[in-house]
Image (cartoon, rainbow, N blue to C red):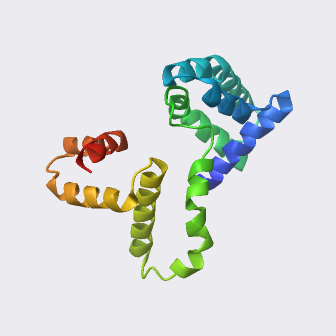
Amino acid sequence: MIATLLQMIILCYYTYYRALGISGHHKTEKELRELASSQEEFLEQRKIKILPLLKELKQWLAKKSLTVRDSSRTGEAISYALGQWSKIMKYIDCTQLTPDNNGAENAIRPFVVGRKNWLFSGSPKGAEASCFYYSLIEIAKQNGLNPHLYLAYIFNQVPLITDKTEWKNFCLGTVKIMFNLIY
């Protein structure tokens, strides 16, 4: 259901930009990443160029929410997008976030191609476990880490965690710093 709602949000997003004749959000994002000399400069430029587009999108969604039935798929998508707006806006302040999930889609493509081989995970819990491990492996690859060493580090450290506050040490940035020091 959530995937369908997200697809509807994307549809609304592209409909909005086509209706206004605005294009190139991804192109602008790519140019900003290539031209910025630092993360601070990138975020500053992103706020200048992308924030107005997001504000327009929110206004458009709010306006459309008044004319679309809430019970329709589009109405559900619009309501969901507006309800998640504070999370959407975090994109503006984080250099690691992108306007789409193409990186994740490309990362899982090898697993999707071989999915027939994994139909026999044994159970839904087995499939969940596979998903968890594949996610860890792709996170390691995406951040330039050796997946084998990364998993070994995590599996050696997790049993040592005694309370919830220690989990923050497994934020990938912290793990990457520790990993580089240890290995």
Splitting the image into 4 quarters, where does residue 4 fall? bottom right
- Total number of numbered discs in the rendering: 0
**Residue 54 vs residue 134: left or right?**
right
Residue 161 seen in this snapshot = yes
Splitting the image into 4 quarters, where does residue 109 fall? bottom right
Q: Is residue 175 above or below residue 84?
A: below
Residue 72 seen in this snapshot = no
- Residue at image x 27%, y 51%? 183
**Residue 182 vs residue 75: left or right?**
left
Splitting the image into 4 quarters, where does residue 117 fall? bottom right
- Residue at image x 68%, y 29%? 31
- Residue at image x 67%, y 43%? 9
Q: Position of residue 149 (x, y in %)?
A: 32, 59
**Residue 161 vs residue 96: left or right?**
left
Q: Is residue 30 above or below residue 152?
A: above
Q: Position of residue 171 (x, y in %)?
A: 33, 42
- Which of the two residues, 51 or 87, is positioned nearer the viewer here? 51
- Residue at image x 61%, y 56%? 106
Q: Quadrant of the N terminus?
A: bottom right
Q: Position of residue 76 (x, y in %)?
A: 65, 45
- Which of the two residues, 43 or 60, is positioned nearer the viewer here? 43
